[in-house]
């Protein structure tokens, strides 16, 4: 049974833009076992008191944000960072209700994974530019691949930090190794974990999902 919070009803009744879109996102989230609360004057969804998801409205779009989004696999390249210095939060932007309806299965997969991450107790440990911590698996693979090592060290501090957070997150060494191997070709291209790799994005260097049009031609 859905647990409706009247504070969110009140918020949606007063929001000036993206009311329909935010309501659709809310309906999707309420299918999961998350508690609905109002935090920072916006809808927030928690698991046993821990923040998992947040909804927000901006001038040009609305978003569903994941507090530990950097740990999500993002197979569909939907996630973007709120800003250059954001180490943990990742979000999906929407500009129409139709877009939300089309991506509903994907949104549910991301929500499910975000809940699993919280249930497993995975944590994101912020690191400063001068004290980035490399997981042992990455150190070993970089030593075995000098070209990748050179490419990785040439990345911007923000890109390196995002990779290190993502690579270090899993508890199992096997999972960490698999994550690292998956991104070795992208690192060789000098790209970050959320950068466009197809060259079609209109929001370079961030991927905006434009690569999906390739399959329709």
Image (cartoon, rainbow, N blue to C red):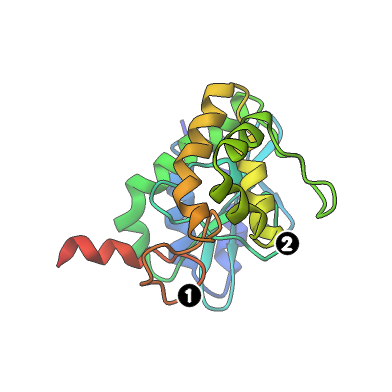
- Find the distance from the CA under tag 2 to the CA under tag 1: 18 Å
**Which residue is identified by label 2?**
85
Q: Is residue 99 visible?
A: yes
Give the residue displayed 84% in from the left and 47% down from the top.
Answer: 131
- 20 and 71: which is toward the camera: 71
Q: Is residue 65 above or below residue 4?
A: below
Splitting the image into 4 quarters, where does residue 85 fall?
A: bottom right
Decide: few, some or many residues near mark 1? Use Cα within 10 Å; few <14, some 14-19, many ≥20: few
Q: Position of residue 30 (x, y in %)?
A: 48, 41
- 30 and 113: which is toward the camera: 113
Locate residue 38 relative to residue 197 in the image: left or right. right
Q: Is residue 69 visible?
A: no
**Which residue is identified by label 1?**
203
- 99 and 145: which is toward the camera: 145
- 90 and 62: which is toward the camera: 90
Q: Position of residue 102 (x, y in %)?
A: 29, 57
Give the residue displayed 53% in from the left and 60% down from the top.
Answer: 191
Earlier-in-chain disc, 2 versus 1: 2
Locate residue 81 relative to residue 205 in the image: left or right. right
Element type where label 2 sits in the image? loop
Locate residue 161 relative to residue 113 in the image: left or right. right
Q: Position of residue 44 (x, y in %)?
A: 64, 48
Splitting the image into 4 quarters, where does residue 170 fall?
A: top right
Element type where label 1 sits in the image? loop
């Amino acid at each position: 049974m859905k647990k409706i919070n009247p504070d969110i009803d009140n918020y949606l009744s007063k929001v000036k833009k993206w009311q329909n879109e935010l309501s659709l996102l809310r309906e999707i989230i309420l299918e999961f076992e998350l508690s609905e609360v109002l935090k920072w004057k916006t809808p927030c969804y928690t698991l046993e008191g821990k923040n998992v998801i947040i909804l927000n409205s901006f001038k040009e779009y609305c978003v569903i944000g994941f507090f530990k989004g950097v740990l999500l696999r993002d197979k569909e390249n939907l996630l973007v960072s709120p800003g250059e210095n954001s180490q943990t939060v990742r979000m999906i932007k929407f500009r129409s209700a139709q877009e939300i309806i089309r991506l509903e299965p994907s949104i549910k997969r991301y929500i499910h994974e975000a809940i699993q991450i919280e249930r497993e107790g995975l944590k994101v440990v912020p690191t400063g530019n001068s004290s980035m911590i490399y997981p042992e698996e990455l150190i070993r693979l970089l030593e075995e691949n000098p070209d990748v090592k050179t490419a990785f060290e040439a990345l911007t501090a923000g890109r390196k930090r995002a990779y290190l957070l993502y690579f270090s997150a899993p508890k199992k060494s096997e999972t960490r190794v698999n994550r690292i191997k998956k991104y070795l070709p992208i690192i060789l291209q000098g790209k970050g974990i959320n950068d466009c790799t197809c060259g079609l994005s209109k929001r370079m260097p961030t991927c905006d999902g434009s690569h999906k049009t390739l399959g329709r031609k």
